[in-house]
Image: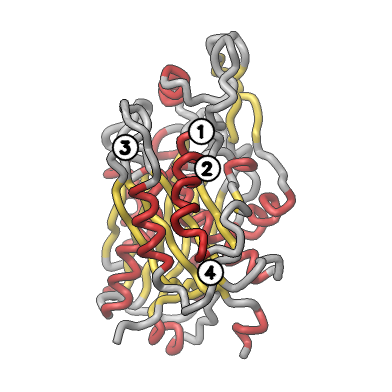
């Protein structure tokens, strides 16, 4: 029988908080991290709007910026282990990264992985990168969960990191009519570019018991699929790929149970709302209220590859702080290249953790 997989540690670095707990509190309070870019101007002659981590100098770019966002999140998630001793041959890292786009160096992934191995290599068996944009973190979670359940690993860090604020990237978003507020007519249907990183510390049931690590949540399932009718194509998306990912994940719910807390990467773009609308109609019996969701892009901007891990960080924090609506949390993500992913958690409250 497959082992249960638990989240036992969380970490985050976002424009609204330097830790998981401060970021979750800011999202809960609706505190926005939007600001004017210090030097990028749109075609209307106005400063571009973005959600930028204020403690990272705007001159820090490329792999340096990704590292500045990612490493604090990983370190925070690892704090749960404390001085506990583990076998590094049985631990790994699954990292969500953006897919190729203007403004990203071709060597970004290799440069970042080299830095990760230099810093964490003694504690990890290996590192796997998932370059799948918005869905990357949840696809990394899917792979990590499968390894842990089969006994191939004792523990795994699942993380995601992204930053849209490179000048070439911002110019490309405007050219694609995806930048909120850009252009002479002010594009109300674009998104606010953001940046951030999220990290989850996952362990097998046996490792949680042997190290005495109380769970924040149990990963019930992660579903994945592919949507052929994508943005920037001459097709109309009706949520077929997202529906398949939803159904795979939701099948793990106990009979009669419904999801109470939904986190998603909707960012103001109409196709995402349309896609979710079709999907929600097909799967509504699994939700207490499918329209009652949390879209953190309203506060920290669109964080792309960091979305999945950060959304699950929020779900764990909500349960620990007693403002979750119920025990089952759900997160989903849609990537521009067609990847679709969704995850279901059974979250633990502090009282449940002590029991």
**Does residue 122 appear in this view?**
no
Nearest to the observer: residue 241 or residue 178: 241
Label 2, secondary structure: give it.
loop
The part of the image, by quadrant, that contains residue 61 is: top left
Residue 106 vs residue 18: left or right?
Answer: left
Res 259 label: none
In the rendered image, the vertical position of residue 22 relative to residue 238, given as above or below: below
Specify which label sits upstream in the sequence, 3 or 2. 3
Q: Which residue is mark 1?
A: 269
Residue 226 vs residue 86: left or right?
Answer: left
Query: Is label 3 or label 2 in front?
Result: 3
Q: Which residue is mark 2?
A: 266
The local crowd at label 1, few if under 14, some if 14 to 19, many if 20 or more residues have their Cα within 10 Å, is: some
In the rendered image, the vertical position of residue 344 relative to residue 61, given as above or below: below
Query: Is label 4 or label 3 in front?
Result: 3
In the rendered image, the vertical position of residue 25 relative to residue 38, given as above or below: below
The part of the image, by quadrant, that contains residue 39 is: top right
Query: Is label 4 or label 2 in front?
Result: 2
Nearest to the observer: residue 238 or residue 142: 238
**Does residue 339 appear in this view?**
yes
Specify which label sits upstream in the sequence, 1 or 4. 4
Give the residue at x 50% y 65%.
286
Q: Which residue is mark 4?
A: 79
Where in the figure is residue 91, as x and y percent of width and height?
33, 71
The local crowd at label 2, few if under 14, some if 14 to 19, many if 20 or more residues have their Cα within 10 Å, is: many
Specify which label sits upstream in the sequence, 4 or 3. 4
Circles 2, 1 touching at the beta carbon (< 8 Å) = yes
Quote the CA–CA distance across marks 4 and 3. Answer: 42 Å
Circles 4, 3 touching at the beta carbon (< 8 Å) = no
Specify which label sits upstream in the sequence, 1 or 3. 3
Query: Is label 1 or label 3 in front?
Result: 3
Res 229 label: 3
């Amino acid at each position: 029988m497959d082992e249960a997989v638990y989240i036992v540690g969380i970490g985050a670095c976002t424009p609204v908080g330097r830790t998981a707990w401060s970021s979750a509190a800011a999202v809960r309070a609706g505190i926005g991290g939007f600001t004017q870019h210090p030097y990028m101007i749109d075609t209307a002659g106005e400063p571009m709007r973005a959600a930028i981590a204020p403690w990272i100098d705007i001159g820090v770019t490329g792999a340096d910026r990704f590292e500045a966002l990612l490493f604090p999140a990983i370190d925070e998630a690892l704090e749960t282990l404390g001085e506990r001793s583990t076998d590094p041959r049985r631990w790994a890292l699954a990292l969500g990264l953006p897919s190729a786009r203007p403004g990203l160096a071709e060597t970004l992934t290799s440069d970042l992985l080299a830095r990760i191995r230099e810093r964490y290599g003694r504690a990890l068996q290996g590192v796997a990168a998932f370059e799948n944009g918005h869905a990357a973190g949840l696809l990394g979670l899917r792979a990590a969960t499968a390894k842990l359940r089969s006994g191939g690993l004792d523990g795994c860090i699942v993380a995601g990191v992204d930053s849209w604020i490179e000048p070439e990237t911002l110019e490309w978003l405007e050219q694609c009519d995806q930048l909120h507020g850009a252009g002479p007519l002010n594009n109300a249907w674009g998104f606010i570019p953001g940046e951030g990183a999220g990290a989850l510390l996952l362990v097998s049931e046996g490792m949680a018991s042997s190290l005495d690590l109380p769970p924040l949540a149990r990963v019930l399932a992660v579903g994945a699929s592919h949507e052929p009718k994508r943005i920037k194509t001459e097709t109309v998306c009706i949520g077929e790929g997202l529906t398949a990912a939803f159904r795979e994940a939701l099948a793990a719910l106990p009979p009669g149970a419904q999801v109470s807390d939904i986190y998603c990467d909707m960012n103001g773009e109409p196709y995402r709302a349309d896609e979710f609308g079709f999907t929600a109609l097909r799967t509504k019996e699994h939700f207490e209220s499918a329209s009652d969701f949390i879209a953190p892009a309203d506060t920290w901007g669109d964080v792309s590859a960091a979305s999945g891990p950060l959304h699950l960080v929020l779900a764990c924090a909500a349960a620990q702080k007693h403002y979750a609506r119920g025990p089952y949390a759900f997160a989903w993500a849609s990537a521009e290249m067609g990847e679709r992913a969704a995850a279901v958690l059974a979250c633990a409250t502090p009282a449940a953790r002590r029991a």
